Image (cartoon, grey):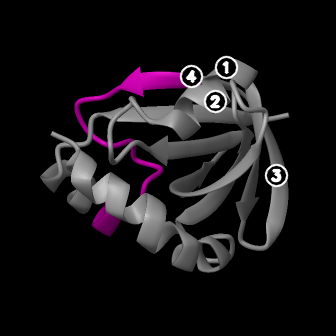
Amino acid sequence: MPFPARIARFNKFVANPILRPVAAWAPYFGVVVHRGRVSGRVYRTPVNAFDRDGGFIFSLTYGPDRDWLKNVMHQGRFTLLHRGKSIELADPTLERMDDPPAEIPGPARWILRRANVRTFMLARRS
């Protein structure tokens, strides 16, 4: 099972504001810039992002029922701030996998296996 919802709530209000500037530069992290599907407001959400040929893989550590993910899927495109660059991504898809993809580094794969994370979002560079 992915991380509990209470941790997601804590991160949303406490950890995310602290992590946002760091996540835009840190390896294996990024900040997804997305627009609210109802409010139209622009949001910036720190995520685990792993570069892959032609796009990125995102581990859904809190499961697929997250507002940022619903916004991205609704829009079909978004911006990723990653390693100091702004990258336009499109065509997000959700994939359920028994094991984290090989493009994810070993230590992160180990953590994702232990947390039983099985759903990932893939998006291509646009």
Q: Quadrant of residue 7?
A: bottom left
Earlier residue among tags 2 and 3: 2
Disc 4 on helix, strand or loop? strand
Q: Position of residue 101 (x, y in %)?
A: 39, 42
* Residue 105 in the figure: left or right of residue 30: left
Circle 3 sits on which residue?
87
Q: Position of residue 24 (x, y in %)?
A: 68, 70
Circle 1 sits on which residue?
74
Earlier residue among tags 2 and 4: 2
Earlier residue among tags 4 and 1: 1
Q: Residue at x 65, y 33 (%)?
A: 123
Q: Is residue 106 magenta?
A: yes
Q: Which residues are magenta?
A: 93-108
Looking at the picture, which amino acid does disc 2 mark? Asn
- Viewer-side label of 1, 3: 1
Circle 4 sits on which residue?
93
2 or 53, which is in the foreground? Answer: 2
Circle 2 sits on which residue?
71
Looking at the picture, which amino acid does disc 1 mark? His
Marks 3 and 4 sit apart, C-alpha to C-alpha, by 17 Å
